Image (spheres, rainbow, N blue to C red):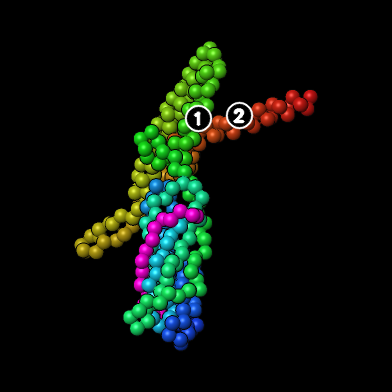
Amino acid sequence: MKKYFIFFILIYFAFTQSAHAIDVSNTGFVPGQIWYSKDTIVEGDTVKVYTAVWNNSTSPLSTKVEFYDQNVILGTRDIVVNPLELKETDISWKVTAGDHIITAKIISPSVSVSGKKQAVVVDNFTTEASHTFVPVVVQTINGQPATSTDVIKSQIDKATSSLDNILPTSITTPVSQGLNDVSTFRNDVYNKVSTSLQDTKKSLDLLNIGNTKVETPVAKTDAKVISPSKTTTGDQVSKPMAYIKLFFLSILSFLFGSSLVFYSVIILVLFFIIRFIYRKIRNR
């Protein structure tokens, strides 16, 4: 995409160039002026910040390009841009968290005329501001970036710790034991469902194999006749029932296999039960 963008900029400036020797009109930064080596910028990354300078004159352009994050200089590059050339330049930026306003400026531009440098004033000497917000990366105790699951677990642990300090042991101990019993129940059911699910899949495989076509040799010839295998009435009933069983077992495996899904369903069911009881009491 960047190549096509630069190509159209070259065409634009080629049609608007002046014929005077040191006329530097339309010289400077190109539209779109700041871009990065990565689409998603993360705290702690080292990325490259790019810009490009167009020389619309007929003489080489020498200049400094300074990159800024608001009022802080990120780096400086000395470049020479040949006549009618679009030259790319970049600096490395160690990304920090927070709001960033990235710009670049052309400093002390000059052109070479008959071997002598002559200071010039270019039109597009500063880029448009590139506004970027970089969120803080939360790290685990091991120094690795924390996932959303780690953050949620951390908050749950904090809430549990707070409850332990508020509620007496006579309450927290039965609640904790009850949660452990529920977790054990979930694991036991999941293991049984998984075993039954595998057995059902094997039964279906056997039923499917039994319904495949078999080759029956014909007497006194080398030819073989393909005849369908015999399908009993029991097979016709067992196969649909096995698929129905497989469907319900898959749902149970999904429900009991994920603690998040399991406890979410329990909370949802409790919510509807409590709401039903509340409405019944209120309507008396």
Q: Secondary structure at mark 1?
A: helix
Q: Residues within 10 Å of mark 2 (few under 14, many from 20)?
A: few
Q: Secondary structure at mark 2?
A: helix
Judge by depth and name the residue closer to the eye, 244 or 65. Answer: 65
Q: Position of residue 215 (x, y in %)?
A: 28, 57
| Cβ atoms under marks 1 and 2 closer than 8 Å | no
Image quarter of the N terminus: bottom left
Residue 81 lies within the magenta run: yes
Q: Position of residue 72 (x, y in %)?
A: 46, 53
Residue type (three-letter) at the residue carrying disc 1: Ile
Judge by depth and name the residue closer to the eye, 177 or 199. Answer: 177
The answer to whether any part of residue 158 appears in the image is yes
- The answer to whether residue 128 is above or below residue 189 is below
Q: Position of residue 227 (x, y in %)?
A: 33, 57
Direction top: furthest residue: 170
- The answer to whether residue 135 is above or below residue 73 is above
Q: Main secondary structure of the magenta part?
A: strand
Residue type (three-letter) at the residue carrying disc 2: Leu
At 69% from the left and 29% from the top, the residue drawn is: 276
The answer to whether any part of residue 246 appears in the image is no
> Which residue is labeled 1 in the image?
156
Judge by depth and name the residue closer to the eye, 220 or 277. Answer: 277
Which stretch appears magenta? 70-85
At 37% from the left and 40% from the top, the residue drawn is: 144
Q: How far is mark 1 from mark 2, CA to CA?
A: 20 Å
The mark lying in front, picked from 1 and 2, is 1
Image quarter of the C terminus: top right
> Which residue is labeled 2 in the image?
270
Quadrant hosting residue 54: bottom left
- Residue 126's label in the rendered image is none
